[in-house]
Amino acid sequence: MIISLPSLYSSSGSSPESLGSSPKVGSSIKKVNIKNSKVLPHRYPWAECGPSPWPACVSIMLVSLFIHMAFGFNCMVSKAELWGGTLLMLISLVMILWAWWESLNLECLVGMMTGPELKNLKTAFFLFLWTEIFFFVGLFWAFFHSALVPSDELGCMWPPIVGIMPLDPFALPLVGVIILISSGYSANRAVKHVKGRYPEWRAMGTTVFLGVLFTCLQLYEYKSAGFTMQDGIYGSCFFVITGFHGLHVIGGTMFNTYCLALMLKGDYTPSQMLSLRCAVWYWHFVDIVWIVAYLTVYVWGNWGMYITPKQVWDKKMSIYEGWPSKEDIFHFIFI
């Protein structure tokens, strides 16, 4: 079916000028063959896409993955079933995400991503990051609730003195901080190269490699840790915070890998690089979360390894019959 553009706009009362297109004066009316066209002219400033199955598939796969991991952590399945099922679900999740991102990239390449749509996608992505921020706020809230006021069951100490040997914050965790900060720098270099019309893929490749290296170091740290998730509230908070951060690192690495593939194909231009920007924003969010986790869980949390400030105060104040002198207060604060 072949129709002319003016007849398409006459029914809606709009014109090509109102949509941003201004044909030249005296030019003949062009006819558009929309029978086999993927992009149909429309009266709205955004394209009307059909229903997509990928969001529902990703949600189902994530829920199934977390339920399977919960069964494994509660010893309801064997270790072989836990790791095998988790690996299979992660591979399936990667394939679904790859198909979803590929469909979005095709919509962008055929011209279905207009200016208002790109703005809405940015807003939606920032709202998604806010939900992730408050998710980790809840996890850190649980950590501080238990660390600031240790209960009697923990011996009024944090970390608990029985059965817990905290990890050295200046060993592998510090290496992880250096790796993620370096990967954030390389990700920024990748964006800068695309903006300068010089799509150098090595910077994004370095980001992907550092993300995989961090995941391997995290797995080695879990294997060498002297406690497990079942060792009270300390083990639960530690593995939940670092474990969910590790899952976000894996997701960000997959996102960066897809951006690397698009960069190798030459699909990015200075005006069409929203997916790359979103990937870098997400990766910076992952970096910031790990820095906060390092400073709180690894460094600050291990300061109370031997005795809490409350116990120090009780021990010092018990020897006084009255109010302490100025010298004693100075000694308590600075020594």
Image (cartoon, rainbow, N blue to C red):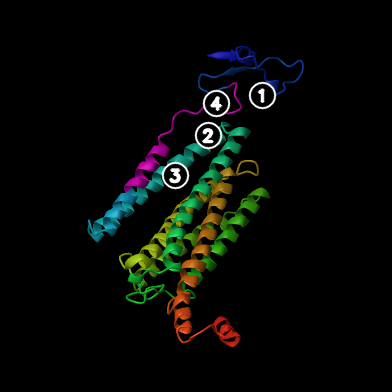
Looking at the picture, which amino acid does disc 1 mark?
A: Leu
Please give the label number shown on residue 142.
Answer: none
Residues marked 4 and 1 touching at CB (< 8 Å): no
Task: State whether residue 308 appears in this view.
Answer: no
Looking at the picture, which amino acid does disc 2 mark?
A: Glu
First along the sequence among labels 3 and 1 = 1
- Start-end of magenta stretch: 42-64
First along the sequence among labels 2 and 3 = 3
Q: Which residue is mark 3?
A: 98
Above or below, 304 against 118 in this view is: below
SS for dot 4? loop
- Locate residue 127, reporting x and y percent: 54, 44
Give the Cα separation between the discs numbered 3 and 4: 23 Å
Give the Cα separation between the discs numbered 3 and 1: 33 Å
Q: Which residue is mark 2?
A: 107
SS for dot 2? helix
- Locate residue 55, reporting x and y percent: 42, 38
- Locate residue 215, reporting x and y percent: 43, 62
Count residues near mark 2 (Cα–Cα under 10 Å), then give few for <14, some for 14-19, many for 20+: some
The question of residue 46 being in magenta is answered with yes
Give the Cα separation between the discs numbered 1 and 2: 19 Å
Please give the label number shown on residue 39.
Answer: 4
The question of residue 117 being in magenta is answered with no
Task: State whether residue 204 appears in this view.
Answer: yes
First along the sequence among labels 3 and 4 = 4
Residue 158 occupies which quadrant of the picture? bottom left
Residues marked 2 and 3 touching at CB (< 8 Å): no
Q: Which residue is mark 1?
A: 19
Residue 160 occupies which quadrant of the picture? bottom left
Residues marked 2 and 4 touching at CB (< 8 Å): no
